[in-house]
């Protein structure tokens, strides 16, 4: 009986703490990520499924460190960087992140437009409405209400799992490709490999999850539940990514159909896997794009205001945090307006935002590892030797692959 009480108490505490880890990880499956996974499955079949095992470990390691720093210090990552590395370096990082996040927000509204065009709805209707929706959610909501909406949006990613089953893959081949690595020195394979890993960890994610932990009021006492939240979120987001690859591999790769983005995948699924699979895929893209279009500007507003000493938080009113809400609004307006400009250089904007993310990621990861190993900051919650080994190895691998991503993005024929 006593064990059952403890068990129920544990479950209730987890449900109270859950949120930041699941939300941050799921936003990683945004319009750009879904496009990358869809193209990978259509072009290479199941060959990249094994990559998700080490990628999930890398994601858990990095996200756990950010969440732990937030719970122990009660401060956001931008706050800690400013206090320990100085204002100049912080401003440099903020400018880069701000530019990159505006570009990423543009790509999310592009995903909104593309997903609804599958149903014949013009971007001149969906993009303004989508922008208004995400703005109202944050500006007029409370943290608890906003988090609930985000968790519902995270649950809607199940549409990709359903689409995967409707594609009727060969599950034996799926299992084999997941646990038996395959590798190639082919330039297209290498470029896709780097692209997949490059979508896993983005600089904004570390700032957002730490700020969300702080605003939610998670303390060291309750941190074990946040750790479970992080681990659960990382597993869920990569399972969804696996199913996106499975869906396009089982249909488009098998049929020899070529696609360029997630919208192409949704349309191509119709004759190959049926109307329901096509609708689920397109709706999943819309959900992911709206979700990320809300989180990215929110993450940006958090870390810019933290670093500059302004009030920040969804639970604060506009009068209490005018800079926070103004910046959030400006980023949304810019992202939506750029999509509506005829012949806007969307590919160029997305390319350079990806490159800037790649350049900033090494700095952010190294700063995190230095901070989390300072006893003055973390007390007894610094990394263990084993965890440091895993974390530094993850950082080196991520930095190397991200630099390769930057090179292959800027000079795509270099590996050829």
Image (cartoon, rainbow, N blue to C red):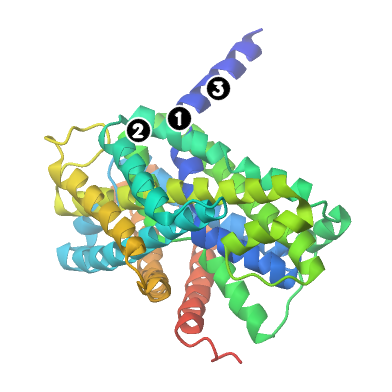
- Position of residue 111 in the picture relative to residue 331 (left or right): right
Asked whether disc 1 touches disc 2, contact meaning CB atoms under 8 Å apart, the reply is yes
- Neighbourhood count class around disc 1 (C-alpha, 10 Å): few under 14, some 14–19, many 20 upward: many
Asked which secondary structure carries label 2, the reply is helix
Q: Earlier in the sequence, mark 3 or mark 2?
A: 3
Which is more N-terminal, label 2 or label 1? 1
Which of the image's four quarters has the N terminus? top right
Q: Is residue 236 above or below residue 356?
A: above
Residue depicted at 29% across the width and 59% down the height: 337
Kindly report the distance in space between the C-alpha atoms of the residues bearing marks 1 and 3: 11 Å
Q: Which residue is mark 1?
A: 17
Ranked by sequence position, the earlier of labels 1 and 3 is: 3
In the rendering, at what x and y percent does residue 315 appear?
A: 26, 31
Q: Residue at x 53, y 64 (%)?
A: 394
Give the residue number, with chain letter if any, for mark 3. 10
Q: Check disc 1 and report its element: helix, strand or loop.
A: helix
Seen in the picture, residue 30 relative to 4 is either above or below; the reply is below
Residue 216 image label: 2
Task: Tell which residue pokes out farthest to the left in this image.
Answer: 319
Q: Is residue 224 shown to the viewer in this render?
A: no
Across and down, in percent, residue 27 comes to 48, 50
């Amino acid at each position: 009986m006593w064990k059952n009480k403890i068990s129920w108490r544990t479950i209730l505490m987890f449900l109270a703490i859950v949120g930041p880890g699941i939300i941050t990880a799921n936003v990683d499956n945004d319009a750009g990520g879904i496009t990358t996974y869809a193209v990978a499955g259509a072009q290479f079949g199941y060959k990249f499924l094994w990559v998700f095992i080490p990628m999930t470990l890398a994601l858990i390691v990095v996200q756990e460190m950010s969440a732990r720093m937030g719970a122990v210090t009660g401060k956001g990552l931008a706050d800690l960087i400013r206090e320990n590395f100085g204002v100049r370096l912080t401003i440099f990082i903020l400018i880069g992140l701000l530019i990159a996040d505006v570009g990423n927000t543009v790509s999310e509204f592009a995903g909104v437009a593309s997903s609804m065009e599958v149903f014949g709805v013009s971007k001149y209707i969906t993009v303004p409405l989508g922008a208004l929706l995400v703005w109202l959610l944050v500006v007029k909501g409370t943290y608890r209400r906003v988090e609930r909406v985000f968790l519902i949006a995270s649950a809607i990613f199940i549409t990709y799992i359903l689409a995967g089953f409707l594609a009727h893959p060969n599950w034996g081949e799926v299992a084999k490709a997941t646990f038996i690595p395959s590798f190639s020195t082919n330039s297209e394979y290498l470029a896709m490999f780097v692209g997949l890993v490059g979508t896993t960890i983005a600089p904004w994610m570390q700032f957002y999850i730490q700020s969300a932990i702080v605003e939610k009021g998670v303390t060291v006492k309750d941190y074990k539940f946040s750790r479970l939240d992080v681990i659960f979120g990382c597993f869920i987001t990569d399972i969804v990514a696996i199913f996106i690859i499975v869906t396009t591999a089982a249909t488009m790769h098998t049929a020899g159909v070529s696609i360029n983005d997630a919208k192409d995948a949704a349309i191509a699924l119709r004759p190959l896997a049926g109307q329901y699979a096509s609708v689920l895929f397109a709706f999943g893209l819309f959900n992911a794009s709206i979700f990320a279009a809300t989180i990215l500007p929110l993450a940006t507003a958090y870390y810019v205001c933290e670093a500059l000493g302004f009030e920040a938080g969804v639970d604060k009113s506009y009068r209490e945090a005018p800079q926070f809400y103004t910046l959030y609004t400006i980023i949304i307006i810019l992202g939506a307006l750029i999509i509506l400009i005829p012949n806007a250089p969307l590919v160029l904007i997305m390319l350079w935002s990806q490159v800037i993310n790649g350049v900033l990621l090494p700095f952010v990861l190294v700063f995190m590892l230095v901070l989390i190993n300072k006893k003055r900051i973390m007390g007894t919650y610094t990394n263990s030797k084993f965890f440091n080994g895993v974390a530094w190895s993850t950082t080196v691998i991520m930095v190397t692959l991200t630099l390769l991503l930057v090179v292959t993005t800027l000079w795509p024929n270099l590996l050829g």
